[in-house]
Amino acid sequence: MFAIRETAVADNSPEPGRQYLRDTFGQGYWGKREGFIALLEWLAALANAGGMNEWTADSEAARILAGRLRNDHA
C-alpha cells in the first residue's frame, strides 16, 4: 500500500513506488514481483466495483505501478 501511495503522490509516476519495493525487499523483490503485480491488479480493479469511488485515485496508481513492475527487468 505504501508503494501505491508513493506512486500517487508523485503524480502517478511509478518510479518512487517501484524503488520503494526494490529497496525494501532487496533481491527478494524479484521473487515477489509477480505477487506484487497480482495484488496491484486486484487493487486496480476496485475502481470498477460499485460503491468504491473512494478508491479511484489509489486504483489508478496501482494500475500504473503494476504496469511498471510488469516491465521491470534486472
Image: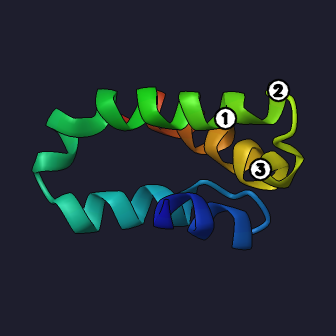
46 horizontally vs 49: left or right: left
Label 2 neighbour load within 10 Å: few <14, some 14-19, many 20+? few
Q: What amino acid type is highlighted by mark number 2?
A: Asn
Q: Regarding mark 2 in the picture, which secondary structure is present there? A: helix
Q: Residue 47 or 22: which is nearer the viewer?
A: 47
16 horizontally vs 60: left or right: left
Residue at 29 percent across and 58 percent down: it is 22
> How many discs mark residues in the rendered view?
3
The way the protein has been coloured in the rendering is rainbow
CA gap between label 1 and label 2 equals 8 Å
Q: Is residue 74 visible?
A: no
Q: Which mark is residue 25?
A: none
Residue at 31 percent across and 31 percent down: it is 35
Label 3 neighbour load within 10 Å: few <14, some 14-19, many 20+? some
Q: Indicate which disc, 3 or 2, sits on the residue closer to the N terminus.
A: 2
Q: Regarding mark 3 in the picture, which secondary structure is present there? A: helix
Q: Position of residue 31 (x, y in %)?
A: 15, 34
Q: What amino acid type is highlighted by mark number 1?
A: Ala
Q: Which residue is mark 3?
A: 55
Q: Which mark is residue 48?
A: 2
CA gap between label 1 and label 3 equals 9 Å
Q: Position of residue 16 (x, y in %)?
A: 53, 66
Q: Position of residue 71 (x, y in %)?
A: 47, 29
14 horizontally vs 33: left or right: right
Q: Is residue 55 above or below residue 63?
A: below
The quadrant where residue 25 appears? bottom left
Q: Which residue is mark 1?
A: 44
Residue at 34 percent across and 58 percent down: it is 21
User: Where the C terminus falls, by quadrant?
Assistant: top left
**Identity of the residue furthest to the left in this view:** 27
Q: What amino acid type is highlighted by mark number 3?
A: Trp
